[in-house]
Image (cartoon, rainbow, N blue to C red):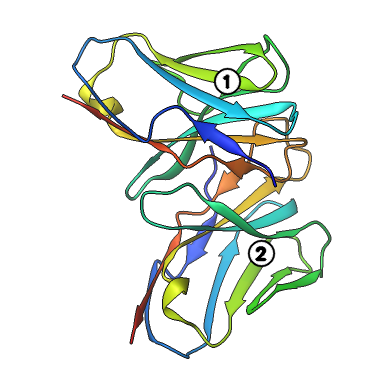
Amino acid sequence: GQQLNQSPQSMFIQEGEDVSMNCTSSSIFNTWLWYKQDPGEGPVLLIALYKAGELTSNGRLTAQFGITRKDSFLNISASIPSDVGIYFCAGRRAGGGADGLTFGKGTHLIIQP
Amino acid sequence: DVKVTQSSRYLVKRTGEKVFLECVQDMDHENMFWYRQDPGLGLRLIYFSYDVKMKEKGDIPEGYSVSREKKERFSLILESASTNQTSMYLCASSTSVQTQYFGPGTRLLVL
């Protein structure tokens, strides 16, 4: 199956800094999802986006569905230690079958106090 | 809140053993999925089911089978476990394929 291009692969930041990560694809998507995975746990849904251009916030997290429908970004403002983890983007291709989601390979976020 | 549970958090099995991984969801979701997650490879879809007794192959079904006898339960079966099936296994469910909710995962080690 196709993988999304997610970047960066990893980020080393200071506590309090803002974070930005994105996913791109050569295909058009009609849904974008952002998940966070803590070590040894399953991914937890953070934000779901269903319309091109949609901008959605969840606390300090903000995500946007790109206007071309081929990309999405996630921003985290004023990072705190519990933001550490792996962030995954996932999308459903327009016209795709009932075969689940396409996932990015994840962005490892590491926060230095 | 959606709850997806997996029968074991950690499993250790020997090569050749038959392994059952169980997943249960309590939100009456139609769709259920099994993924495996490996470093550097991300999440890969093994099988999914969009109704009771229905199953569809995902991207990497070889060496696996599934069973969905009841709507809330989706089982992943390794007929004869091999060392290359050592991985983190994640179950997910959804009412539609847009938003999937994941279980906590089962970390399987095959010796």
Q: Residues within 10 Å of mark 2 (few under 14, many from 20)?
A: many
Badge nearest the viewer, 2 or 1: 1
Q: Which residue is depicted at the point 72% across and 30% down?
A: A98
Residue under label 1, please give it.
Answer: B74
Q: Chain of mark 2?
A: A
Residue A111 x %, y %: 37, 79
Identify the image quadrant of residue A101: top right
Residue A47 x %, y %: 68, 62
Say above or below: A19 vs B59: below
Q: Which residue is depicted at the point 76% across and 65% down?
A: A68
Q: Residue furthest left?
A: B111
Q: Which residue is depicted at the point 76% across and 71% down?
A: A56
Identify the image quadrant of residue B89: top left
Which of the two residues, A97 or B54, is positioned nearer the viewer here?
Answer: B54
Residue under label 2, please give it.
Answer: A71
Q: Amino acid at mark 1?
A: Phe
Say above or below: A113 vs A61: below
For this view, does B14 lie left or right of residue B108?
left
Q: Amino acid at mark 2?
A: Asp
For this view, does B31 lie left or right of residue A13?
right
Q: Chain of mark 1?
A: B
Residue A8 x %, y %: 44, 71
Residue A54 x %, y %: 81, 69
Say above or below: A71 vs B73: below
Identify the image quadrant of residue A49: bottom right
| Separation of marks 2 and 1 at Cα, in angstroms | 32 Å
Q: Which residue is depicted at the point 70% across and 28% down?
A: B31
Say above or below: A58 vs B3: below
Q: Look at the numbered disc 1 and give the secondary structure of its residue.
A: strand
**Quadrant of the drawing holding the C terminus of chain B:** top left
Same-subunit check for callouts 2 and 1: no
